[in-house]
Amino acid sequence: MYFPLFKWLKIVLINLFIVATLGVILRYKILFPLPFVGQKNLLHGHSHFAFAGWVTQCLMVLLVNYLVQKKGQSMYAKYRWVLYANLFTAYGMLIAFPIEGYGLYSIIISTLSVFVSYVFAFMYWKDLQTVSKPSIAHAWFKVAIVLNAVSSLGAFSLAFMMMAKVAKPEWYLAAEYFYLHFQYNGWFFFGCMGLFTSFISRYNIPSNVLKKIFSLFAFAILPAYFLSTLWMHIPVWIYILVVLAAVAQLTGWIWLIKTLKKYKTEWSSGLSVFAKRFLLLPALALTIKLLLQLGSTIPSLSQLAFGFRPIVIGYLHLALLGVISLFLLGFIIAENYLAYSVHLVRAVIVFACGVFINEFLLMTQGIAALDYINVPYINEMLLGAALILCTGGFLLARSKKGSNCSVTN
């Protein structure tokens, strides 16, 4: 059974378009009446589907494709049902959450989604162990799938506290940030770094350097969780670890940039000019994100930032759209999985412009909120940004098969 890579990429790009469409509806409802749509329930459906239907589905497809390239077409036959299971639960949450919010069916389906991630982690770890020529990318992949499973502890803790009617809101926040941290900075980020490392490892870049960069990020991932909880009373030794984690992440990133510059001729030789330029966007977004994380080690700034919802929303969109989504699109383009054309260039430029405008407006709104200033027509402008993102998502969903898809198709 061959691996229809383009079919799966087409599905995830359609899912990205659906996520963007839900974003438009959410922004529209802030401005205009839409009585048959529950804002909070739709927001839950939007976020769950963005995680499971777009990012997780895309990462699973690309990780399975990595195994197919290393071990042959039998890997697709093995993982086919897991990919369908994750897709099924993603669409289940897309339907259930807008209808009932956190109800019986949505909780059952989201729990099934977690179990699918457990099965994928178990299977993928075992198969990576049998690859004949191990790569440093395997270390990124292994940590990614483990952290995807670990993140579920936050979701289960949150569900338990809701059922037990725990009265401490800071515990709710701690559980929610636990889930988000190990999704965004764990599963999503380490998965993307594994894909990028697998790409550059084909060239003559010293593996010992790549291993040290991985070690810095691996060390930082656990203590970095407390960057989101500095508003709580944490021991001094944990705070020191948090500062070290923020410094380690930025150090690892700077080291990687210097390494890429040193070996630019080797690893960039197979990339189109457009792919090289486009990948600069998630790199810039990640640089901003890591600098913000370092700045948040100052407790007063952390309390200020996490006390204002617009800033939190802006930061989360920076990570999900600016870093993760743009990287996944850039990686797909770099590997020629989508046919290079004027239509593709137009699609990713429109989407990237939507990301930039959306982030600029969210950060402007967040900074203004610090002084309790209301930015005129901010919601109208955010609706416009959502429409640009949706247009870019629609154009991407119409993309055609690239040359490298034929290798595994």
Image: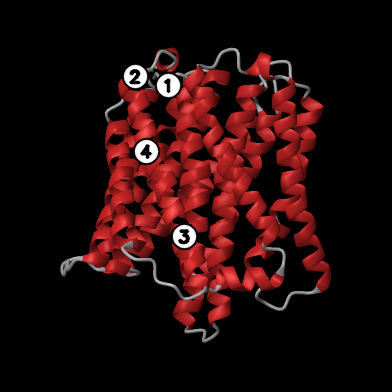
The disc, 4 or 1, on the residue closer to the chain's N-terminal end is 1
Mark toward the viewer: 2 or 3 = 3
Q: CA distance from mark 2 to mark 3?
A: 38 Å
Residue where numbered disc 2 is placed: 401
Q: How is the image coloured?
A: secondary structure
- Does residue 85 appear in this view? no
Q: Position of residue 67 (x, y in %)?
A: 55, 25
| Residue kind at label 3, given as amino acid type | Thr
315 to 190, vertically: above or below: below
Residue at screen point 70% across, 40% down: 253
* Rendering quarter of residue 207: top right
Give the side of residue 235 with respect to residue 186, left or right. Answer: right
Q: How many marks?
A: 4
- Secondary structure found at label 4: helix
SS for tag 3? helix
Residue ID for mark 3:
364
Alpha carbon of mark 4 to alpha carbon of mark 2: how far? Answer: 19 Å
Q: Nearer the viewer, mark 3 or mark 1?
A: 3
